[in-house]
Amino acid sequence: MRIAPYILCLVAFAGSTGCLSVCHNASRTLCKEPKQFSWRKDRCQSMALYGSWAGQAWQERLAAGCDCETPDFAAGFQSGFVEFCYAGGSGEPPPVPPRPYWIPGNRASPYSDLAEHWFAGYRLGAQVARDGGYRDQAVVPSALPPACSCKADAAQGCDACGGFRMEAIEAYPEGVELMEPEVVPRPTST
């Protein structure tokens, strides 16, 4: 029973040093916020939603008479659409196709077109997602103005689209000189 006063003093001391705010922040970060938003669950739900959008867009493409009915083109379309909705970007496919196209048999001459079909489908899927405004529906709203994507003159600003140009933001005001950091040699032991 002699330890109880020490524990009481330790708790009182911990409370006076700001540890309660650390405990509060840890509780909020580790317990409360994951219940409100789980990135794993969000990724699964988002990919399923974007996949259903891609399926609908593909069916509309086929109904409109798209002459691109190869399975590889369809797989590329699906991937491009979903990836553009989820991550944005330029709409260009990754440098290499998915792993099934890496198989030596798929690299040979008659089958090497399969990867090209996938790349073409990816580009079209991303373009359809961009043109259809699906990416705008997929992002969380922000208070920041959108980045400018128009081709307006940089001197005019972006009044045409309402966004702002990243190039227009100066990294350093004029007249500020950047100094090289001083390099101090390390002592050598002999």
Image (cartoon, helix red, strand yellow):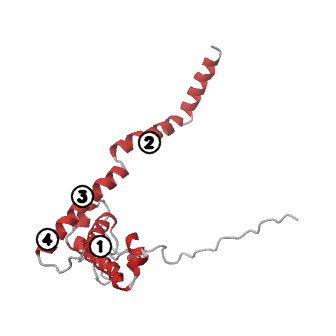
In whole angstroms, how far apart are the C-alphas of marks 2 and 4? 44 Å
* Quadrant in the picture for residue 143: bottom left
User: Which is more N-terminal, label 2 or label 1?
Assistant: 2
Q: Which residue is mark 2?
A: 30
Q: Is residue 84 left or right of residue 99?
A: left
Q: Image point 64% across, 18% down: which residue?
A: 3
- Foreground residue, 108 or 83? 108
- Residue 108: where, in percent of width, then height? 39, 83
User: Which is more N-terminal, label 4 or label 2?
Assistant: 2
Q: Quadrant of the C terminus?
A: bottom right
- Residue 175: where, in percent of width, then height? 52, 78
Q: Which residue is mark 1?
A: 76
User: Which is more N-terminal, label 4 or label 3?
Assistant: 3
- Foreground residue, 165 or 108? 108
Q: Residue 15, can we see it?
A: yes
* Quadrant in the picture for residue 68: bottom left
Amino acid residing under circle 1: Gly
Amino acid residing under circle 4: Glu
